[in-house]
Image: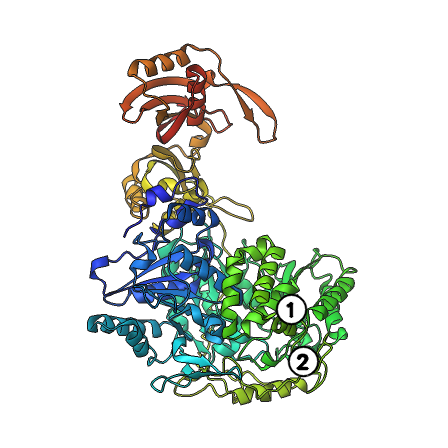
Amino acid sequence: MTIALDKLISPEINKPARYLGNELGAVSKPWDEAKVRWVLTYPEVYEVGASNLGHIILYNVINAQPRQLCDRTYLPAKDLADKLRSTGTALFALESKRSLQDFDILGFSLSYELGATNILEMLDLAQIPLTWQDRAQGDYPLIFAGGQTATSNPEPYADFFDFIVLGDGEELLPEIGLVLEEGKDAGLGKEELLLDLAQVPGVYVPRFYDMQSDGSVKANRDDVPARILRRVATPIPAYSIGLVPYVETVHDRLTIEIRRGCTRGCRFCQPGMLTRPATDVEPEKVVDAIEKGMRATGYNEFSLLSLSCSDYLALPAVGMEIKNRLKDENISLSLPSQRVDRFDENIANIIGGTRKSGLTFAPEAGTQRMRDVINKGLNNEELLRGIKTAVEQGWNKVKLYFMIGLPGETDVDVAGIAETVRWLRRECAGINSKRLNFNITISNFTPKPHTPFQWHSVSTTEFLRKQNLLRDEFRRIRGVKINYTDVRISAMEDFVGRGDRRLAPVVRRAWELGAGMDSWWENLDKAFGAWEQAIAEAGLTWKYRKVAQGEWNVFEGRGQRAEGRGQESETNLDSPLPWDHLNTGIDKEWLKQDLARALEAATVPDCAFDGCSHCGVCSTDFGHNIVVEPPAIPEFEGHFQPLQQREQKIRAWFGKHGEMRLLSHLDLVRLFDRAIRRASLPISFTGGFHPGPRIAIANALSLGITSSGEIVDFELTKNVDIEDFKRKLTAQLPSEIPIYQVAEVAVKSPAATQILEQAEYLITVKSSEDQGREVWEAWLQEIKNTSEILWEKTTKSGKKQQVNLCDRLFELELQTCMPNNSVVLRFLGSCRNDGTKLAPDNVIYMLEKVANQEFELLTVHRQKLLLNG
């Protein structure tokens, strides 16, 4: 059933444009022609989920399949969630506006240990039972999860899902779609369908497996695999080009994956272990995808994505090629994950320029011994060389990530973090006139499944002691901003991340008590309290205390006391683990051997570039490392220089109708910027450190108001035929933002924002009682005859000011009498950008003053804007 969106999504909802589902790149396939109907979601608010690359790729992959339809949904913000519950409306998919219950399959990305509470919130909003046991009797979609956390250890969440997908989904999800299509054609029941899915490599169906008394998980029937294989797939950059949201998102840029997997072998890093082997994308495909994607989306920034972008040897050549091709278009590049030992002048050139992106490195540890323990593969000389290069290339602020609580760490190692920062500052002094400043994040080591350090944990007391030690050390260093991860979050991540099926009731109860993801940032005490209460009610406080007190400490030796504990704790590396039935390709024996190497601070080479480390992953099931030889680096043609010449000014009159009324003014500005880029129109730029396109909308239209008379000015670097301009721009705008007219005005003429004088509105007003036309006419005449109606205005500085609204009203008339005690009024009033304006609310205020009753403003439409001269 289709949701009545116009009644649900109104201007009172915060950022309503995120729920429209009509963004550029959204796919709306015919409902009746699809055999299998999917909904994919990243269970976070729209700004986070819609910009997640994995979500975009899988959405595009499924929609590329015949007879398969894929829609999207996200976690609604609290205001919409409350409205859904109060109206009894089920959570809906964005494109089709249908209830999630109408679909065949609903998939969630589970990429964080504490993120499952958001999934339960969404299932509850969709009016779908939370567990597979509760869904057994009803006709509900199949519910599944994928993502890093689901792949590493799905057991704490097993009760909530019909199946789990392990590893990469580009090939696996289409295979699942075919099984579902055949199953529907054959009329299979849910149990039979899930049994068929369990035969697909990479699909784990929890109901066919039971937890044993020793904590291991075994199949409860003979016709399913004893171990479930993690799937791997080759990145396909073309599928990254897709959604262009109207609202500003967390990653508001085009993102292209250049390398999947990492073979550095950092012993704490779960993604590095779960994405082996490493696969480079061919440079030509990367360059083609970026150039095509930037022109198709209109973004002004792109990002190259990998667990370690610097290990993509073609990065300098690819980055320089794109930089040169797009150097006249004010486009910047960001690299979210770089290694400081590979940062050089070539990389500095491709991410530098007028709009420098932030620079982030992760030394992780403060001493060479600790970097060897974790197998970071970084020495002091390489660290200093990378930071010096950054300073020489114009950066005066660098972000660094460090970790405390690592196995074998001493107080000297902890203090070494501050000493490293002090040393870097000293060695870089004098390179340029500005002091080198650091933003530093200190995170707490959290053991992750499938890593050599999965057997080690640290007490929260010890974490707090080490944080205080660092605070004392950094107190004497200026120009350093430090953020510390709350130890309670780390302990809870550890408890859930390495848990088993006994934790499902804990996760559910924590959600019931309000421990959603957002609560960790809004009220950490409340969120932590909810989790603690949920743990206590499940009778698992003893288990959480073991984690919080440092359950295992591999450096203490077998049978030794763990940090901060008063009881014996053996670290038995041979004990079954809740995730042993998952075949990630990494040999558990190799993990134990690598842990032993860590105890000796022995390093392992990067097998993508040096010798094989014998981790066990390279095989017919998982493939082998694919490293592409780097092409020659093109000559650097220089950074973007904004084209500031102004050869032509074009003024356009446009409308804003339908769902586009829910776009904010800033969203509209961004929409025009991207439309101009996609249309390849020669826009002029401002100067300075942050050049912007010379696009000026005459007046901001309030959210929820429609219009057929808006004005926008464009300044161009060369002359363009007026009709060509209109045609190209119209082709890149939504149909509900029509371009009515364009005209050329003198380049040096005042902008429309400067000469705007008046605005004409049509407003629909409702009275509490039925009034005849004569009564309305009398009220309007009284307003026109009145010389003064004062209204108190609050200025930007907070001062109160009396304004005579009558001075701002020029015309007022009754247009139409409507049913339900409402009328349509037309008025012409002041509308200047110095704050002199008559808003529709002001007219209602004037009407209430003369009629001595309250009125309701139902709709507002701006007819036109009038310019002076």
Can see residue 619? yes
N-terminal label among 1 and 2? 1
Q: Residue at x 53, y 48 (%)?
A: 690
Image height check: is 380 above or below 534? below
Q: CA distance from mark 1 to mark 2?
A: 15 Å
Question: The disc labelled 1 sits on which kind of residue?
Answer: Asn
Image height check: is 439 above or below 262? above
Question: The disc labelled 2 sits on which kind of residue?
Answer: Asn
Report x, y in % for residue 409.
Answer: 71, 77
Q: Residue at x 49, y 77 (%)?
A: 274
Residue occupied by mark 2: 553
Q: Residue at x 49, y 69 (%)?
A: 504
Report x, y in % for residue 309.
Answer: 51, 70
331 sits left or right of 199 in the view? right
Image height check: is 390 above or below 831? below
431 sits left or right of 67 in the view? right
Mark number, residue 444? 1
Q: Residues within 10 Å of mark 1 (few under 14, many from 20)?
A: many
